Image (spheres, rainbow, N blue to C red):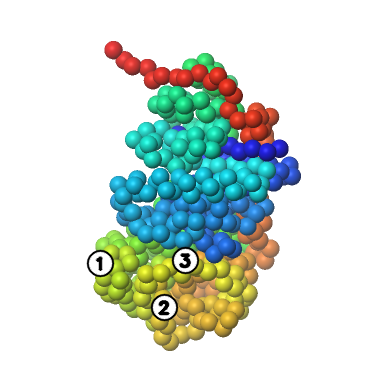
């Protein structure tokens, strides 16, 4: 079996990332040598690869579904938004400037060559490549310079399936309209539909799917049901919804639940760090956006941020900064990760204007540390020890720390101290630290003791196993609910010839 497929979506968060992961898992379990690919991603959730670069977190999850280590080839262009109008550009894993929406258009011709070369290289090394689009191909105002949806499909002659989220409503119109606004040459590559997040009676949906086929000449390849068990690794901050419990935690082993409040910063980065906490029985993790939600929390987490100084100002403006300080003053644990760690220190220096105008701002003063932003970004995948346990992690940050008093939270394998452990206030630049099972149990036990909770960390929770189970769930959903024979034909043979061109209907 050899070939490729592009999964596009009617909207952002329609289910492209999880569907690609599910198809990859289904193929991998059949023994197919498969790899993921997303030409251009826009996300502040990223990981560091073994080949030393930075890619979107979703592509790392998709790589795991394929049984592969993350590689910069899986996501050659990554945009990391810093404001509503500007993004840092990462090309083949390396930062390559900052762009506005307008200036980025001027770079896309060169980047199309980058992504098509990378995809061709990937297809030469793997039997099947499952590609993920970005946003929606119906953004026709961006079509002339598109490198991730129909622009990529045309350049690489990829068959396309379009997934729509029925939970949002209007999915049939979204699917039809996506096709109808495309030019004929683009439409010729769109070969079918997939409906995502369906709950209800399939018999009620069937007539609509029949009419969609009659209108478009294209079949629906399957309807994926709503799965409440599926929750891990949100693609971007759209998944970080305030107040709801993250994940599906099992009941506590002791009498009490442990309550974790994660501050939902405006430019939250790598918020998936807290997913590992959500895998623990008896741990209720919530994203919060206002001070009252910290009142009954046993552990407060300040996650990473793409714009640390601006998000710190937001923290103060909302009253959350005072609530975090009061929480720490009461002897209750606070954990800061990357940007959140920098906020906990005494001062943040930005002499080169990495984030905004050059200058210095005061932090919350809860840790004896100062941070200076360097122009060069630090990427790494270090190992070491934390709270007496062996750990592995990854680092993505511009900040360089000047530590004062207090033991380090992490001691790297070469003896370098990293982060600060001040007892009830802890901070680190290391992402993925909570995915280390023994370390996570020690942190939760410390938080429970400080809160006086009868909470017993589960001795057998494996975050790696939880993630693998989520990937298997995705593979099961694909295998049981999609026409996998038709999917395989598309991958190997491409879009069928003679698909009709659909025109949007004008009203008089």
Q: Which of 7 and 476 lies nearest the eye of the viewer?
A: 7
Mark 3 and mark 2: span between their CA atoms? 13 Å
Point out which mark residue 401 bears. Answer: 2
Query: Residue at (49%, 34%) from the top-left corner?
Result: 154
As drawn, is 99 to the left or to the right of 56?
left
Q: Please tell me whether mark 1 sits on a helix, a strand or a loop.
A: loop
Q: Are marks 3 and 2 in contact (CB under 8 Å)?
A: no
Q: Which of 258 and 81 lies nearest the eye of the viewer?
A: 81
Image quadrant assignment for residue 455: bottom right
Return the disc, 2 or 1, that comes first in the chain's sequence: 1
Query: Residue at (42%, 48%) from the top-left corner?
Result: 110
Point out which mark residue 396 bears. Answer: 3
Q: Please tell me whether mark 3 sits on a helix, a strand or a loop.
A: strand
Labels 2, 1: front one: 1
Return the disc, 3 or 2, that comes first in the chain's sequence: 3
Query: Residue at (42%, 83%) from the top-left corner?
Result: 403
Q: Position of residue 48 (x, y in %)?
A: 53, 62
Point out which mark residue 273 bears. Answer: none
Q: Please tell me whether mark 2 sits on a helix, a strand or a loop.
A: strand
Q: Which residue is mark 1?
A: 357
Mark 2 and mark 1: span between their CA atoms? 20 Å
């Amino acid at each position: 079996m050899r070939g490729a497929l592009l999964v596009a979506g009617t909207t952002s968060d329609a289910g492209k990332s999880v569907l690609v992961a599910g198809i990859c898992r289904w193929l991998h379990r059949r023994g197919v040598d498969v790899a993921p690919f997303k030409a251009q991603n826009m996300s502040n959730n990223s990981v560091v690869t073994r080949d030393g670069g930075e890619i979107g977190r979703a592509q790392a999850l998709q790589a795991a579904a394929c049984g592969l280590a993350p590689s910069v080839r899986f996501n050659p262009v990554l945009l990391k938004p810093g404001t509503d109008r500007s993004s840092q550009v990462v090309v083949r894993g390396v930062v390559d400037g900052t762009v506005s929406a307008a200036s980025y258009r001027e770079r896309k011709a060169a980047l199309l060559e980058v992504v098509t070369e990378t995809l061709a290289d990937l297809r030469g090394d793997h039997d099947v490549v499952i590609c993920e689009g970005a946003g929606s191909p119906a953004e026709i105002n961006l079509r002339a310079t598109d490198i991730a949806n129909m622009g990529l499909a045309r350049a690489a002659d990829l068959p396309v399936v379009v997934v729509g989220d029925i939970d949002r409503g209007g999915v049939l119109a979204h699917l039809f309209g996506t096709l109808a606004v495309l030019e004929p040459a683009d439409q010729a590559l769109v070969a079918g539909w997939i409906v995502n997040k369906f709950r209800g009676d399939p018999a009620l949906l069937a007539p609509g799917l029949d009419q969609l086929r009659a209108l478009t000449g294209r079949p629906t390849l399957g309807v994926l049901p709503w799965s409440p068990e599926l929750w891990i690794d949100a693609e971007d901050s759209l998944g970080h919804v305030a107040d709801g419990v993250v994940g599906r935690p099992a009941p506590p082993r002791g009498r009490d639940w442990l309550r974790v409040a994660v501050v939902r910063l405006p430019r939250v980065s790598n918020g998936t760090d807290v997913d590992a906490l959500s895998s623990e029985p008896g741990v209720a993790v919530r994203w919060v956006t206002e001070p009252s939600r910290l009142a009954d929390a046993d552990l407060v987490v300040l996650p990473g941020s793409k714009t640390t100084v601006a998000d710190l100002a937001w923290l103060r403006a909302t009253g959350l900064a005072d609530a975090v300080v009061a929480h720490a003053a009461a002897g209750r644990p606070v954990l800061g990760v990357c940007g959140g760690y920098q906020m906990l220190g005494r001062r943040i220096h930005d002499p080169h204007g990495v984030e905004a105008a050059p200058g210095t701002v005061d932090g919350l003063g809860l840790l004896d540390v100062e941070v200076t932003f360097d122009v060069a970004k630090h990427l790494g995948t270090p190992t070491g020890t934390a709270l007496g346990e062996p750990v592995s992690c990854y680092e993505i940050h511009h900040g360089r720390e000047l530590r004062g008093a207090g033991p380090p939270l992490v001691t790297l394998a070469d003896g370098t101290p990293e982060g600060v452990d001040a007892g009830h206030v802890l901070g680190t630049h290391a992402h993925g630290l909570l995915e280390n099972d023994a370390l996570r149990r020690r942190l939760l036990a410390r938080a429970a003791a400080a809160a006086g909770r009868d909470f017993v960390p589960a001795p057998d929770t494996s975050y790696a196993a939880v993630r693998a189970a989520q990937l298997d769930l995705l593979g099961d959903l694909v295998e049981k609910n999609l026409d996998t024979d038709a999917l395989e034909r598309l991958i190997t043979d491409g879009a069928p010839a003679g698909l009709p061109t659909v025109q949007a209907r004008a009203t008089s």
